[in-house]
Amino acid sequence: MRMGLSKRTQKKTLYALVRVNLRALGLGILAAVLSAAAVFTVSAMAPQEGVSIPIVMYHSILKDEARHGKYVISPAEFENDLLYLQEHGYTTILIQDLINYTQGGSLPEKPVLLTFDDGYYNNYFYAFPIAKKYGCKFVISPIVKHTEAYSETGETNAYYSHATWEHLKEMADSGLVEIQNHSYDMHKSKGRLGVKQKPGEPDEAYRQVLTSDLTQAQDAIAAHLGAPPTAFVYPFGAVSQSTPEIVKALGFSATLTCREITGVVTRDPESLYGLGRFLRVSGISSREFFKERMKLS
């Protein structure tokens, strides 16, 4: 005699199967929701895509081979640098281009920024004509006290003179050269290293000293060239803990250091602070400098 399940037992079994299937379905939906949430969270937390900005730091350009070294290169070396960059698809830009990028603007496919520190006359005498020849752009950050001094004397010696206001204006008006702030008179290594806070110096006293100097430079450049600089270039790359905040409070949109790293600029304006630069020394080829030291393709 075959034993069959009662109707009551059959119903219980059916209800149990339904509950199991619903529970499995619920777990599946929950897993899908959690998975989607995880993907969204990762996407939201992922860093913004940015553009690598290689920056070169130059100082002086002279023909005298006896002067060539860490801070002085030859006109030929500078010209070869421009040729190398153009041949490898790089486009020279200005800091304003980076600021525009953070505000929704565009950048060339392979941007590169060329900078000259201190504002020597030889930048005008040698670098500027070469840059015009190839349509290349660069940034000059003068020590304003020296700019004023040589504007008064009118002395133009490629070995030691600094560019005058007239020289800086001619370069700026060309559209190829951008003038930025390198301090009024804080490019010194004795007593205080650049704009760094001295040991034991009260915070408020330091703030006043730095604010006064940078503001004096801003006002002088604006008076002679028509607009204040948008970036501050740290002398010697020296920075104290409170320096960046003071500089930003003065309205600078970007800062350049002496750290030999390639910065990445995103749409976030904060990415323009603390950009690194590579010092161009004499005695090595453009290929060795750009490909091997800066790792440019």
Image: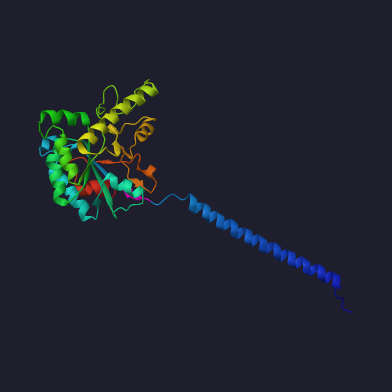
Please give the name of the residue rendered at 74% of the width and 64% of the height, measured from the top-left corner. Answer: 19
Corner quadrant of residue 228: top left
Nearest to the observer: residue 164 or residue 35 = 164
Q: Residue at x 79, y 68 (%)?
A: 13
Percent x, y of residue 85: 22, 51
Q: Nearer the viewer, residue 74 or 147?
A: 147
Name which quarter of the figure residue 209 lies in.
Answer: top left
Q: Quadrant of the N terminus?
A: bottom right
Label the magenta part by its dominant secondary structure: strand
Q: Decide which of 52, 251 is in the foreground and name it.
A: 251
Return the residue found at the far bottom: 1
Q: Is residue 206 left or right of 183 when viewed as pictured?
A: right
Q: Residue furthest right?
A: 1
Tag count: 0
Let me know if residue 51 is in the magenta part. yes
- The reply to whether residue 61 is in sight is no
What residue is drawn where x is 13% and y is 50%? 133
Q: Position of residue 202 (x, y in %)?
A: 38, 21
Taking the image as shown, residue 107 lies to the left or right of residue 286, namely right
Residue 195 appears at what percent x and percent y? 31, 28
Q: Is 215 situated above or below 202?
A: below
The reply to whether residue 269 is in sight is yes
Residue 246 point in image, percent of width and height: 37, 31
On whether residue 119 falls in the magenta region, the answer is: no
Quarter of the image holding residue 6? bottom right
- Colouring of the image: rainbow
Give the extent of the magenta segment: 50-54
